[in-house]
Image (tube, helix red, strand yellow):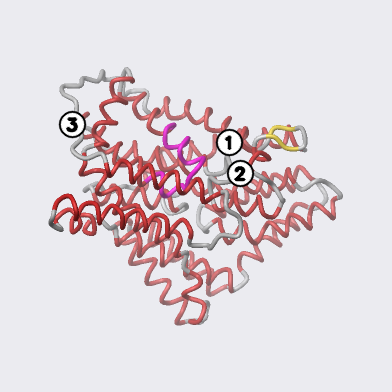
């Protein structure tokens, strides 16, 4: 375990210290994890979350056609017309992303909303860095709101035998949805404070003309199909990825039929963000190596011992410990490890497990917003900015991510305890 932890820490130090070379650091670390035997070669393929990579690739292609059609600029015109100043444009974009993310995957949400943010900022002649960071963290927050919002929510639903409605009301009490939404409302105040100086009035000179509505149809089809798929039980793990790739293929065929040439298709493939795909692949392998070495299990055992017999102390350790761990470790293997541990803890304490289940989800899902590489949505957002020519400094992310995360977690932490303890 110790050598694996040391290599893991060095990897994250490199990724934070050298943001331009994060993908190389992650890939290099993944290779070392395999060479040193932390992850057997035969388990490497299964360690990679192909569903996420397929979703990213397919949605990137669909988004390219969407941008070329002019629709993001048209949506930007509408949003700008409804908001009195730049500050409220940013808050509105973040809230919009959060609402969408409650029903489809966080990464897909960022890929779909970010082009609109880029269009808005171009019209306002401003850097899109802060706005897209706000969109990414808001998307990650709302993933815990519903059964279909994030993989961790689906895992909880399966472990606790919860259906879609149980996230709203369960056993006569308010569900985790309301904890997340109260946290989201509290983060609006954070965003208003952070962007309080952005009070410049907005002037719209001319409205964008949309040249092709079919890319918008494919984009909406992706959303609807992802929502529909979330209600299908016993589906293949790569279902969402296949949906995104399938819709992208439809967009490619439509472009070839309409334009009679492959220029738009070549441009769409050129928009694939290989650095982000490489970064995520490397991180998947590294985290699987940590899991295989027993590091995540050991973390769970330490948390159990620290909580003792006090339910409040156990709840607090699970929430805030999960926040810290999920800032650096992918929350999917962590939550998978902790769910049976929490079930056993609740049984030993002779208490209902829901307060601990919900605490785990609040901490593990929102904790990824503490760092630029703590959640796939954040990595995707930063990748979009890099492709657009903007480098994101760690300070740029921490300025929003840290107060946003602490506020949302604190509100959710208090709500769940008061309602469920």
Q: Going by the image, does 180 lie left or right of 266?
A: right
What residue is rendered at 24% in x and 59% in y?
269
Residue 70 at x, y percent in the picture: 21, 38
Whether the magenta-drawn stretch holds residue 102 is answered as yes
Crowdedness of circle 3 by 10 Å Cα count: few (<14), some, many (20+)? Answer: few
* Front residue of this view, candidates 311 and 334: 334
Numbered range of the magenta stretch: 95-110
The image quadrant of residue 116 is top left
Q: How many marks?
A: 3
At 46% from the left and 61% from the top, the residue drawn is 51
Compared across the picture, whether 72 is left or right of 30 comes to left
- SS under mark 1: helix
Quarter of the view holding residue 220: top left
Q: Label 3's element?
A: loop
Q: Position of residue 122 (x, y in %)?
A: 21, 34
Picture disc at residue 180: 1
Q: Secondary structure at mark 2?
A: helix
**Which residue in the structure is indicated by mark 2?**
362
Residue 373 position, x and y percent, is: 43, 54
Q: Earlier in the sequence, mark 3 or mark 1?
A: 1
Q: x and y percent of residue 302 in the render?
A: 70, 60
Q: Residues within 10 Å of mark 2 (few under 14, many from 20)?
A: many
> What's the distance in space between the residues labelled 1 and 2, CA to CA?
8 Å
Q: Which residue is mark 3?
A: 209
């Amino acid at each position: 375990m110790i050598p694996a932890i040391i290599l893991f820490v060095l990897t994250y130090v490199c990724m934070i210290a050298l943001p331009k070379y994060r993908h190389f650091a992650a890939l290099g670390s993944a290779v070392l994890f395999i060479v040193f035997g932390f992850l057997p070669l035969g388990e490497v393929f299964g360690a990679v979350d192909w569903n996420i990579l397929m979703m990213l690739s397919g949605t990137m292609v669909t988004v390219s056609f969407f941008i070329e059609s002019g629709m993001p600029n048209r949506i930007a015109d509408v949003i700008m017309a409804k908001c009195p100043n730049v500050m409220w444009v940013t808050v509105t974009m973040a809230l919009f992303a959060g609402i969408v993310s409650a029903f489809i995957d966080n990464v897909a949400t960022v890929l779909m909303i970010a082009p609109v943010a880029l269009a808005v900022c171009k019209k306002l002649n401003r850097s899109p860095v802060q706005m897209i960071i706000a969109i990414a963290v808001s998307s990650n927050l709302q993933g815990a709101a519903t059964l279909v919002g994030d993989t961790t929510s689906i895992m909880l639903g399966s472990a606790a035998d919860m259906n879609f409605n149980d996230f709203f009301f369960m056993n006569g009490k308010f569900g985790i949805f309301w904890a997340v939404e109260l946290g989201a409302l509290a983060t609006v105040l954070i965003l208003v404070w952070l962007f309080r100086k952005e009070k410049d009035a907005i002037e719209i000179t001319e409205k964008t003309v949309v040249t092709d509505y079919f890319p918008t149809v494919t984009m909406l089809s992706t959303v609807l199909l992802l929502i529909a798929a979330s209600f299908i039980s016993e589906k293949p793990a790569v279902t969402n990825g296949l949906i995104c790739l399938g819709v992208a293929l439809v967009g490619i065929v439509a472009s070839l039929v309409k334009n009679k040439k492959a220029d738009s298709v070549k441009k769409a493939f050129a928009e694939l963000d290989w650095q982000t795909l490489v970064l995520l692949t490397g991180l998947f392998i590294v985290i699987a190596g940590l899991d295989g070495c027993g590091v995540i299990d050991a973390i769970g055992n330490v948390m159990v011992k620290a909580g003792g017999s006090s339910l409040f102390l156990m709840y607090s350790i699970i929430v805030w410990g999960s926040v810290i761990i999920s800032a650096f470790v992918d929350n999917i293997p962590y939550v998978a490890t902790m769910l049976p541990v929490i079930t056993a803890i609740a049984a030993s304490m002779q208490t209902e497990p829901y307060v601990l289940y919900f605490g785990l989800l609040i901490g593990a899902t929102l904790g990824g917003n503490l760092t630029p590489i703590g959640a796939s949505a954040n990595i995707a957002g930063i990748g979009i900015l890099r492709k657009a020519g903007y480098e994101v400094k760690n300070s740029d992310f921490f300025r929003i991510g840290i107060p946003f995360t602490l506020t949302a977690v604190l509100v959710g932490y208090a709500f769940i305890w008061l309602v469920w303890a």
